[in-house]
Amino acid sequence: MATVAEHYAKHLGPIYLWMAGGPEVALQAGGAEIAALNLPLAAGAPVCDLGAGFGMHAIPLARRGARVTAIDTSAELLHTLTELGGDLPIKPVNDDLLAFRSHITEAPAAILCMGDTITHLPEFGAVESLIANAAATLPPGGLFIASFRDYSVPLIGDQRFIPLRSDDTRILTCFLEYEPKAVIVHDILHQRTSEGWQTRVSHYRKLRLSPEQLIASLQSNGFNVRREAGMRGMVRLVAQSV
Ligand SMILES: C[S@@+](CC[C@H](N)C(=O)[O-])C[C@H]1O[C@@H](n2cnc3c(N)ncnc32)[C@H](O)[C@@H]1O
């Protein structure tokens, strides 16, 4: 089975922006989510975007005046972020998000981990370590925001086949296989080439993290937590350090 980093490097990274609808649609969606959050950020406020990808949230945040540290293990997606972000104040960092504290020099006003990134962590202990580090880094009133898919209730039968995107040249479908604490995500890509359709498959693990588990971990680290509906059926937690 591929590691998360390998899966993105070999399979998902090159088509991720296409999967999200292309730059215009994706940045509009990210911008709408940032607008809906209505974050109380002062001009120039430092913000960390963990698992920033191509900048779906980092770019709208920087357009609103934040100075963003965008961390991701995918060099390819960070390269796209740099191209799309232009002169915006975004520092791309190619590293594991768990090491975020070593890449900041001042306390961030907010830490974001959006778009089902937190479920990429290898086990619940890593989630707890991330929350503890966020609590230790944020000032009182600082925000930790995560959006993710709730895989705690398994889909069954045909529900496990999820069409992600298709057009004349590509069809991307995902298939979910459940383990007690994780879900194996199979990404199945059909791609039209000059020699006809080709199929490529790669799979990796995601955590079956329940919103209740994450809320409990945030509360035990001193956060007040609000739960909301996120984009595309995700759960969004907005946690404020007290
Ligand atoms: C599902 S994508 C979400 C990207 C972005 N936050 C968004 O909403 O579009 C997950 C991202 O997290 C990155 N990632 C996964 N595990 C990571 C880790 N441990 N450290 C840093 N980045 C990670 C992947 O490379 C990918 O860009």
Image (tube, grey):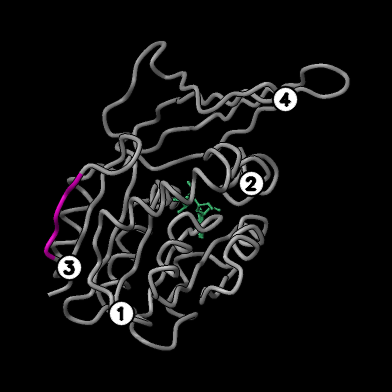
Dot 1 or dot 4: first in sequence order is 1
Residue 227 in magenta? Answer: yes
SS for dot 1: helix
Which label number is shown at residue 137? 1
Q: Residue at x 43, y 65 (%)?
A: 49
Which label number is shown at residue 13? 2
Quadrant for the N terminus, please.
Answer: top right
How packed is label 1: few (under 14 Cα within 10 Å), some, or many (20 or more)?
A: many
Q: Is mark 2 within 8 Å of ligand 1?
A: yes
Q: Which residues are magenta?
A: 224-228
| Distance between the alpha carbons at the discs numbered 3 and 1 | 12 Å
Q: Residue at x 64, y 57 (%)?
A: 80
Quick check: marks 3 and 1 in contact, CB under 8 Å?
Answer: no
Residue 203: x percent and y percent?
Answer: 58, 34
Q: Which amino acid is tagged 3?
A: Gln
Quick check: marks 4 and 2 in contact, CB under 8 Å?
Answer: no
Q: Nearer the viewer, mark 1 or mark 4?
A: 4
Residue 170: x percent and y percent?
Answer: 67, 25
Q: Is mark 1 within 8 Å of ligand 1?
A: no
In the figure, 200 relative to 109: above or below?
A: above
- Given residues 204 and 40, the one toward you in this image is 40
Q: Image check: 198 left or right of 216?
A: right
| Distance between the alpha carbons at the discs numbered 2 and 3 | 32 Å
Question: Which residue reaches farthest bottom?
Answer: 105
| Distance between the alpha carbons at the discs numbered 4 and 3 | 44 Å
SS for dot 4: strand
How packed is label 2: few (under 14 Cα within 10 Å), some, or many (20 or more)?
A: many
Residue 142: x percent and y percent?
Answer: 23, 75
Residue corresponding to mark 4: 191
